[in-house]
Image (tube, rainbow, N blue to C red):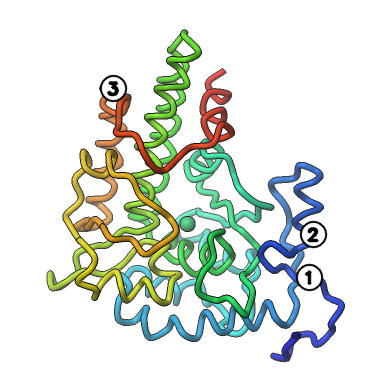
Amino acid sequence: MATTLGHDTAEDIPGLTTTRAPFIEAARAHGELYIEQPYDLYNGENHEAWRQLFARMGDRWQRYANPRFLQGVETLCLDPSAVPRLEDVNKFMAPRTGFKAKAVSGYVPAYLFFDSLRKREFPTTITIRDAGRLDYLPEPDIFHDIAGHVPMHTDPAFADALVRFGEAAQTAVHIVKRIKDPDEQVRRTTSIMKAMARFFWFTVEFGLMRAPDGKGVKAYGSGLLSSYGELQHSIESPMVQRYPIELEWVINQYFEIDHYQPLLFIVESFEHLFEQVGMLEDWMKQGKLDNVSPGEPSLSEVDVRSFIDASA
Ligand SMILES: [Fe+2]
């Protein structure tokens, strides 16, 4: 059903709804990964989904979000009533940290994604979830990417940690380049990537940080900040284990994406996060990521190839 919000009421605008966006399907069919954001294709229902998602997060962000995230939301001047235009977001973000949101048609292979961070580009999903299913979504959408990730990218210290992570991915490519045996190259690439994916998951996606007054913790991970239910759960629930980050634990810890996270890690500050990324890279150089424990996440051949092909 189309709804009215001072936007269109036309029933014939196809919309950019997750899994139901003809524009995206066409782009993928043509092999186009980086695309424009065809703003006129958002229909009333898409804007209504954004409005509802944004409205209900307000109080929870105030209570549970890291203060730098709250500043970021203000900096970006996001419109609570309409899906954001990436060019508007970039106008406010780029002068702060140089980061720019860049529209993509779908999944970005792992190395390309990490290397984008190194270049201060953030591959951004432009579809939005169905207004009738606000809570659960296995795929990222523009609410996760713009309201969950991008406010953090306005913070220089956090942005530097992301760039550092992209540099670590480049180091991984240099390391796997030197491995001559193809099977061993795949095996070690897979292990290093698994460690990197786990680190990214437990920090950028689901990280907690000690609150500035030293009492309790606040969320800075985008998976938490874009989830109405899990944000509160992550801070309040006795079902969640919260521990100071330990690199050797994080890189060997499997995770599952289809339920609330039972284990979260706490950093002290974004400077601390930056140091941890540096340590991850050091360990990579020392071979300490070559045999991490098996288990999730499972990596697609496309992801593994993206590293090996970059080293060719
Ligand atoms: Fe994410």
Q: Amino acid at mark 1?
A: Leu
Query: In the image, is residue 180 above or below residue 57?
Result: above
Q: Amino acid at mark 2?
A: Phe
Above or below residue 83? Residue 282 is: above
Drawn side of residue 273 relative to residue 136, left or right: left
Residue lying at the far right in this picture: please name it.
12
CA gap between label 2 and label 3 equals 44 Å
- Give SS at disc 1: helix
Residue 168, by quadrant, is: top left
Q: Position of residue 240 (x, y in %)?
A: 24, 65
The disc at residue 23 is 2
Q: In percent of the image, x 41 and y 27: which residue is there?
A: 172
**Residue 81 left/right relative to 231:** right
Q: Please tell me the numbered disc located at residue 287.
A: 3
Q: Secondary structure at mark 2?
A: helix
Q: Give the total of numbered labels.
A: 3
Viewer-closest of 119 and 115 = 115
Q: Is mark 1 within 8 Å of ligand 1?
A: no
Which element is circle 3 on?
loop
Percent across and percent down for residue 69 are 37, 69
Q: Dot 1 corresponds to which residue? A: 41
